[in-house]
Amino acid sequence: MNEVNKTLFIPLYGKAQVSSQKIILDDPTAEEIWGAEQFPLHGKSASKWLSYNMAMRARIFDDWAAEMIEKNPDALVFHIGCGLDSRCRRVKSAYKSWFDCDFPDVIEIRKKYYQESDSYHMITLNAADPEQVKALPEAPAAIIILEGISMYLTGDELRGFFKELQTKYEKLHILMDVYTEFGAKASKYKNPINDVGVTQVYGIDNIEDVIGGLDIRHKAEHSLTPAHLVDELKPADRAFFKMLFTGKAYSKIYRLHELEK
């Protein structure tokens, strides 16, 4: 497994730790898989503050996905760069077809813990390869979950991915977290992904640089640390977490965009 793929263990660990505390995220599958895999994490990647952050991010994506499925019950759901995440189980809305997508070695591990069904599928996908995107299943509408993946794609690769999606699907609903350019530069020195060997990531300051001229538009920007989730932390932890992950300083590093066609 290469360094980028190893980053999947960081959110897995965070979700498992937070779920075991019965706050923010109910994820018994993460607890089970983490207990079985026990990938060695150290330093910032194993901090409780990052665990809270990972769990909140996952919960935001879960809630958004559930809402989109309720509004678009016939849409296909694609979780790009799914890692070992159990969103397909956490989201309770009845989806028509859910596709968890990742590189072959990740899908191979994933199949130890998940089984396919008529409505749930695991497929290999490199989002930077237009031919693989063209081969995705057909449907009038698609819900695209891009959690923790955009920063590993160049601006041209991300634009190419969206271009293929807009050609393939009449309607698109996309949620994507991004590093800013400053955040990407700072990641070379202070990012937990460095602990598993990743040093090259990419940032976006202006989302129009990626989607300008496409049929995809920017719908909204959302908080990655909404107050109702931060309030689930213990008071002492809450105060320090707010210092680290909320406010204008955090938005200069990391942002969350909703797009649609």
Image (cartoon, rainbow, N blue to C red):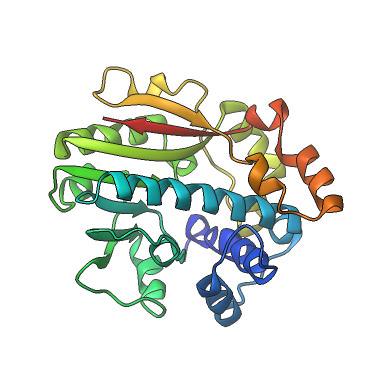
Q: Nearer the viewer, residue 82 or 223?
A: 223
Q: Position of residue 83 (x, y in %)?
A: 44, 62
Name above or below for residue 231 compared with residue 165: below
Q: Position of residue 25 (x, y in %)?
A: 58, 61
Compared across the picture, whether 27 is left or right of 52 comes to left
Q: Position of residue 241 (x, y in %)?
A: 77, 45
Name above or below for residue 131 compared with residue 22: above
Name above or below for residue 150 compared with residue 24: above
Q: Is residue 129 visible?
A: no
Q: Nearer the viewer, residue 237 or 45?
A: 237
Name above or below for residue 11 compared with residue 148: below
Q: Position of residue 79 (x, y in %)?
A: 36, 54
How many numbered callouts?
0
Query: Which residue, as the protein is rendered here, is positioned at the far right?
Result: 236
Indicate the quadrant where residue 179 lies: top right
Indicate the quadrant where residue 180 lies: top right
Q: Nearer the viewer, residue 13 or 143?
A: 143
Q: Residue at x 29, y 52 (%)?
A: 77
Q: Residue at x 58, y 59 (%)?
A: 11
Indicate the quadrant where residue 214 lies: top left
Compared across the picture, whether 84 is left or right of 179 comes to left
Compared across the picture, whether 46 is left or right of 63 comes to right
* Quadrant into which the C terminus falls: top left
Q: Is residue 245 visible?
A: yes
Q: Nearer the viewer, residue 228 or 223?
A: 228
